[in-house]
Amino acid sequence: MSARNDIAFIEGFRNGDEIAIRELYDTHYRPLCYFNQKIVRHMQEAEDISTEIFLKLLRKKNDFDSLQEIKSFLFTASKNACIDFLRKEKQQQKSSNNQISFIADFDENLIEQELLTAKVLQAIYAEIESLPKQCKQVFKAIFIEGKSTAAIAEEMGLSPQTVLNQKAKALQIIRSAVSQKDVFVSLLFIELMLSAFFKNESGL
């Protein structure tokens, strides 16, 4: 996003523009869930924290002057919320004298490592949001919603071959974009495409 577009985007966000808010959510929610789940080890709690952070962002929307400030807030607030959750769980463990195996002293180095991965995920999701409209619809339907080629073709009024062509086009565009960033981003993208992180149909 160019500086000019960044300013227009922030203005729209601060004015409550639904498209800007949806773009922020689509770009950041899953990376935040990934990051939070790696720390608290509970997907439901990770999703709850991510949702609460977005609500806080909306309540504070007039406090941000740039997209970078928003990104920083989302990840910093998530990190703090996760640490607060772990502290409360540890306190409850001490109070009840029960052993909760998943609770351990949080490792700042591990948190920073997962934060880096989450930011890379955010960059990948930003590339997804930048795809041409039809490519984006097909990509999300296949890799995020886990729909079959036949189901997407029927829903979108396309032939199965057109869906496959749009899928291949989307993958090519994203691979090209992330390959220009750095090796780590490229490797992570490939790993995600081969893993269950996206609810993918059989085969790429």
Image (tube, rainbow, N blue to C red):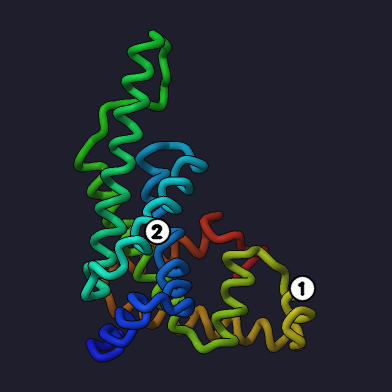
Q: CA distance from mark 1 to mark 2?
A: 32 Å
Please tell me whether mark 1 sits on a helix, a strand or a loop.
helix
Which percent across, then down, holds residue 90?
A: 33, 22
> Between residues 120 and 100, which one lies in front from this camera angle?
100
**Where does label 1 land, which residue?**
151
User: Seen in the image, is 48 located left or right of residue 95?
Assistant: right
On the question of residue 178 being in view, the answer is no
Seen in the picture, residue 65 relative to 39 is either above or below; the reply is: below
Q: Is residue 57 above or below residue 167?
A: above
Is residue 96 visible from the viewing direction of this image?
A: yes
- Residue 102: which quarter of the image? top left
Residue at x 61%, y 63% (from the top left corner): 200
Circle 2 residue = 54
| Image coords of residue 103 (percent x, y) | 36, 26
Q: How many marks?
A: 2
Q: Residues within 10 Å of mark 1 (few under 14, many from 20)?
A: some
- The amino acid type of the residue labelled 1 equals Ala
The C terminus - image quarter: bottom right
Snapshot quadrant of residue 186:
bottom left
Compared to residue 86, the image places residue 1 above or below, namely: below
Front-lying residue, 1 or 6: 6
Q: Is residue 21 above or below residue 32?
A: below
The amino acid sitting under disc 2 is Phe
Q: Residue 174 got which mark?
A: none
**Relative to 85, 136 lies left or right:** right
Q: Secondary structure at mark 2?
A: helix
